[in-house]
Amino acid sequence: MLRLQIPEQLVSDLNLAAEKMLSSESTVRVFSHHDADGIAAASILAKALAREDREFHLSIINGINEEITKWIGKERDELVVFLDMGSGDAERLASLDADVIVLDHHTPRESPEKVLEINSHRYGIDGTTEASGSSMAFLQALAINPKNSNLAHLSLVGSTGDRQHVGGFTGLNAKIARMGEKEGLISSKEGLNLKNSPLINAISGSCDPFIRGLSGREDRVRHLLKELGIDEGKRPSELDEDEEKRLGSLLLLRLLKQGCRPDIADELITMRYIITSLGIYVSEIADYMEATSKKDAGTGVALGLGDEEAMYRAKEMAEEYAEELMKALLTLEKNGAREMGHIQWFWSYSSEVASAQAGIGMQYLLNQEKPVFCLTELERNRMKISARGTRYLVSKGLDLAEVCRAASKFGGSGGGHNIASGCTIPADKRKEFLKTADEMVGRQIRT
């Protein structure tokens, strides 16, 4: 723990949480968020508790609401731990007749004393860029037993799933990455930000980055590679220096021409982290976990715990998910978004890909001067909204967490980060919410 040089108060609170988990005579009840970061965080804590022979019961959920708290109340658990969630619901959690621990990195609100909330922001660590839910779970695992340092790679998987790797790991994430490299868990090398599959597939199948005219179009990629004199069967890792430079320069130019901000386009060539025991990019495992979060979260947790069969199942799910996401992105490429004064919005046909469609669309396809709101209809007259911005817009004052919390005014709920957030609202309040969001963003962004 000390090797990571984290604040003393954070160490103290983590040790207190570890003591509660290890001394509890009852089963440790764990709830974690339903995304790649949450699944990675769950895997880390599950592994740490299992190594101490602590009995635990883990559930992956999409959020905390009245239904969930009633469910927990009926279980009569003595100790309940929330991972990658809980900071926005601390008052609700305080009503539980149980000890409550929250390990989170989302923008915090007031927290009752009854809840032991360990949120990165409260210790001067930016939870948007420097620490994920997995980062906090990893610190907790170290507090339980320093030998859990060999779970560092899972922390990076979660942080990558939350896109905190963009621009390179910083803050706590960077410290964990250095620890992982020193212990031989990961290695790093600068290279093209493409999957390490044959180039014909790596480029045509690339959702992130999404390259106009090439992503989703195998015939055009084949023609491009033939013009460059590069074998379409080569993998990015097999390119010589000249080939990588020529291909990278051409793809970079295309990204800039399609309107990407330079800081996003520069991510085409970035630091790639490889899990040495698997020989697979951290980013690919993050993709696997993200796909399982949509299809079968249990497989994602099993993957994090090292189950080989789960790896194959997760890979299949990731391939299916990538096909669905590509279809959604091609639709967005064709139709674009509807613009209001200060925001833009579009419909997504699938709640599974909506958040990724919004994030990738914001970076590669849409107006870079306005945050995007992706709308998806749910059952029972509910609507899911995924909001995404850029670091450029955040630097101008954008705070999407504040905007999405305004959903409470319309009978909904929401929150998240300044750059990426979400909410659910009654479907018939769509126009009113979008009008409010447009007005709020207009006040936030400094011109």
Image (tube, rainbow, N blue to C red):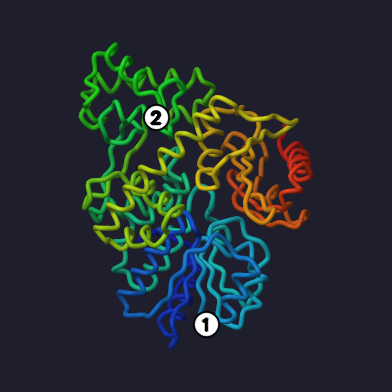
Marks 1 and 2, the one that precedes in the sequence = 1
**Quick one: SS at disc 1?**
loop
Q: Residues within 10 Å of mark 2 (few under 14, many from 20)?
A: some
Determine whether, in the image, residue 85 is placed left or right of residue 66.
Answer: left
Q: Residues within 10 Å of mark 1 (few under 14, many from 20)?
A: some
Q: Amino acid at mark 1?
A: Asp
| Image coords of residue 274 (percent x, y) | 27, 45
Q: Residue furthest front?
A: 380
Residue that numbered label 2 is attached to: 268
| Image coords of residue 50 (percent x, y) | 33, 74
* Whole-number angstrom distance, CA of label 1 to CA of label 2: 47 Å
Instruction: Say which residue appears at 62% left-offset and 75% top-offset.
Output: 70
Instruction: Say which residue appears at 34% left-offset and 19% top-offset.
Output: 219
The reply to whether residue 165 is visible in this rendering is yes
Determine whether, in the image, residue 117 is placed left or right of residue 289.
Answer: right
| Image coords of residue 287 (percent x, y) | 38, 46
Determine whether, in the image, residue 38 is placed left or right of residue 92.
Answer: left
Determine whether, in the image, residue 446 is placed left or right of residue 229.
Answer: right
Instruction: Say which residue appears at 59% left-offset and 34% top-offset.
Output: 392
Instruction: Say which residue appears at 43% left-offset and 82% top-offset.
Output: 27
Residue that numbered label 1 is attached to: 77
Establish if 311 lies above or below 320. Answer: below
